Image (spheres, rainbow, N blue to C red):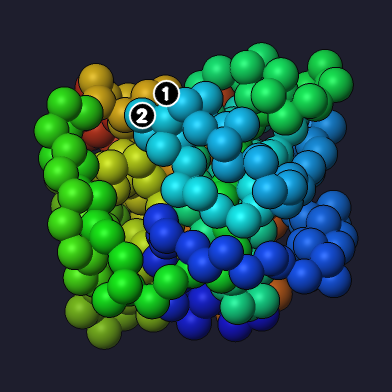
Amino acid sequence: MNYLELIENRNSIRDFHKKKVEQSKIDELISFFNSSPKLIDVDVQILVSADDDTASRLSGVAGYRGNTFNAPAYITILSEEKDNYLINAGFMAENLVLKLEELGLSSCFLTSDDSEMIKKVLLINSDLAVATVIAFGYGKKERDTTKLDIHSPSDVSISNKAGHIAPKIAATALAFDSDFNTAYNFDDEYSDPVIADAVYAASLSPSFLNHQNYRFVINGTHIYLFNQLDNVVPDDDNLLGLGAAMLNFHMILSSKYSGIGNWRFDTSDIKADFKNPSDYTLVAALDI
């Protein structure tokens, strides 16, 4: 997989053709997911629902304000509820979304904050929690679709779509050098172009309302990841988006450098003063 190309090409698509997704592609997705890397040791399972009535059963139960976008197929990721399980689910889900892109399929993450109801309508008999739901299929071209503009949870408008759903924060605003008081200089002749690509890839990851609540502090070969909780983005969606950003960042680094370890959540040994605002919390670290 050419991760950077897939990351750049992917958009969240909210309108789909009625065409069925081939079983061979569904089988490939399941196999890919089951062999995908994880952030933590946790029981995670995938369920693909592609019946004609799946969209109607999920309508009002999953998705922003119950809108499931009438896709021909849906992925449900189930997870054991452990520390950081939602971040892990976002990490694995983003990898799966990029695989969908490689297979010529479009997708959209759906808000899924009622695990038990989603399991009920999809007839899922499992003790695992619903971590996330992804609508997917053959997406309509952008000029043929509508744009959902989410200005705030109470201010939503629909118009003809043109380009991305909402503007994203530039990569240059997401990274700092050593602490939050110093912006990372991407133009410095000594800066690492691979790290620059990794931050850029993370900036293109999906996040609720495109809030992109993550920030990177880069100190030589050490990457520190911070997350912000706010009053607009639901906590579950915030953590899923954080995991997606971590996947994009990691895949770009590991595609260029051999022997890259995984993100670690135990940061108790890190004593540095990052001068981070009080609403940003250190979540994970990565050593190159």
Answer with left or right where residue 27 lies relative to residue 266.
right
Q: Which mark is residue 207?
A: none
- Measured as percent of width and height from the top left, residue 287 is found at 57, 55
Give the quadrant of residue 280: top left
> What amino acid is found at the position of numbered circle 2 in the picture?
Arg
Measuring from the top left, give residue 229's x and y in whole percent: 32, 25
Residue 193 visible, this orientation: yes
Q: Which residue is mark 1?
A: 235
Q: Residues within 10 Å of mark 1 (few under 14, many from 20)?
A: some
Above-or-below relation of 245 to 153: below
The residue that appears at 48% across and 41% down in the rendered structure is: 68
Label 2 neighbourhood size at 10 Å, few (<14), some (14-19), many (20+)? Answer: few
Q: CA distance from mark 2 to mark 1?
A: 16 Å
Q: Secondary structure at mark 2?
A: helix
Instruction: Give percent across and percent down for residue 53.
Output: 66, 41
Label 2 sits on residue:
65
Tag 1 secondary structure: helix
